[in-house]
Image: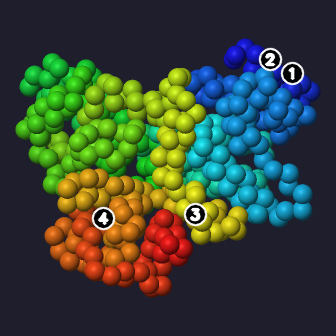
Amino acid sequence: MLKRAISFAEEAHQGQKRATGEPYFIRPLTVCEILIDYRADIISLVSALLHDVVGDTNTSLSDMERNFGPQVSLIVDGLTKITRGNLQKDEYNAINFEKLLTASEQDIRVAIIKIADRLHNMRTLAVKKVEKKVPYANETLILFSPLAEKLGLLKIQDELEDLGFSYLNPPKYKKMKKLINSYTNVFIKLFHECNENLESNGYSFVAKVDWDRMPLYKAYSLLQEGHSLSDLFSVKIVTDSTINCYSILGILHNLFKPIKGQFEDNIAIEKSNFSRYLKTKVIINGMEVKVTIQTESDRASNEKGIFSLLKEDLSQEEIRNVSSTLLRNSINAVKSISNNPIEFYDLASFELFQREIAVFTPKMDIFLLSEGSTALDFAFILNPSLAKRMSLAKVNGKYKPINTALKDMDIVEVITANREMLNSNWLNYAYTSKAINEALFN
């Protein structure tokens, strides 16, 4: 099937050239190669090879379905831009963004291929005119980097961000590169100190101890937020079982002084499908050092991201369930409160790409919300009919108004009245499109 797709795409793009002067077929082939690095499923690879065929050649979607099946046809359709006609650039881009996300909620591989396509375009951005580079790089950081993060495509995210950073602010990019390189040797000494102490205190069950430094854009962002240079580096420990993760944590905290408030358990409290690990911070030779601990299997899932969920034998219904869950069913909720493409673009990009916090019920059921969400947003995600009778919230055991902004790890209880409390002021308290939609129309 892959061989047929290569031949089909190469023939369809015959004679077309990119701005770089290379044959156009190199573009879809490179997008496919990017996904091969993630060991993507065959439908993703074939769709990547064919993703520009309908938009740029005389091939129809019917031809696509007849030759490669309905799944490939659906994905290619989601990636094919509409005819621009008389549309203004902003509206045209917004409509295509809405089409992309709507199709991605049906099959997340639409978004995956678009991200890989964007990475290839960023790698070849140097050939574009200066006035096009900056807005393109800016859009990459605003939309495609957070989308890659949401799908666990972390290597792609890091490369997108560093490429975007290099075009948006070349002087600071070079400065960050120099700064991190100069600090690397300092951190390596701390790493060896940590590793030698672990070795001498018996951690034979550990598979690997390594170190890592943060990509440039992430490093720059952290420093802008007031973090120290030591936050840009980490010790990474990989072991063979979950129980050993906790054992190593105990050894580590016994050897080095842990820093209060810096421990995260993302194994017991799973916030993401793609990042199960323990994180702590300890003092080594007077300096703070960040340490992450995880199992081999979790690291493998980390590296594969979304492709750890997309198995070859999944049905289209199972793909749809995975897709809508990853996008938090946000697309339909946003559509229900706005049918203006530009407004949709703003609302969806804002809601989908916010950082997430974990909030618990008193029974310790976990819910993921966008950072900035209120107790009211939590109530509508928990139970819309209950939310309409909400009078107060109890946050960490204390009574709070319904517009209280929630924080990561809060325990929230919805306090209700005997009658419906819903009123127009609630639109000022709702942060998520689901809560706004329920308050407006239900």
Label at residue 344: none
Marks 2 and 1 sit apart, C-alpha to C-alpha, by 6 Å
Residue drawn 40% across the image and 30% down it:
301
User: In what quadrant of the picture does the N terminus appear?
Assistant: top right
Residue at the top extreme, as displayed: 3
- Taking the image as shown, residue 32 lies to the left or right of residue 265, namely right
Residue drawn 15% across the image and 54% down it:
260
Q: Say which residue label 2 marks.
A: 7
Marks 4 and 2 sit apart, C-alpha to C-alpha, by 53 Å
In the rendered image, residue 81, in percent from the top left (x then y), is placed at: 78, 47
**Mark in front: 3 vs 1:** 3
Label at residue 334: 3
Precedes in sequence: disc 3 or disc 4: 3
Q: How crowded is mark 1: few (under 14 residues within 10 Å), some or many (20 or more)?
A: few
Residue drawn 28% across the image and 80% down it:
418
- Taking the image as shown, residue 38 lies to the left or right of residue 209, namely right
Residue 280 sits in which quadrant? Answer: top left
Q: In this view, does 422 lie above or below 194?
A: below
Q: Can you see residue 168?
A: no
In the rendered image, residue 426, in percent from the top left (x then y), is placed at: 43, 80
User: Disc 2 residue type?
Assistant: Ser
Q: Say which residue label 1 marks.
A: 11
Label at residue 407: 4
Precedes in sequence: disc 4 or disc 2: 2
User: Disc 4 residue type?
Assistant: Lys
Q: How crowded is mark 3: few (under 14 residues within 10 Å), some or many (20 or more)?
A: many
Nearest the eye: 414 or 50: 414
| SS type, badge 1 | helix
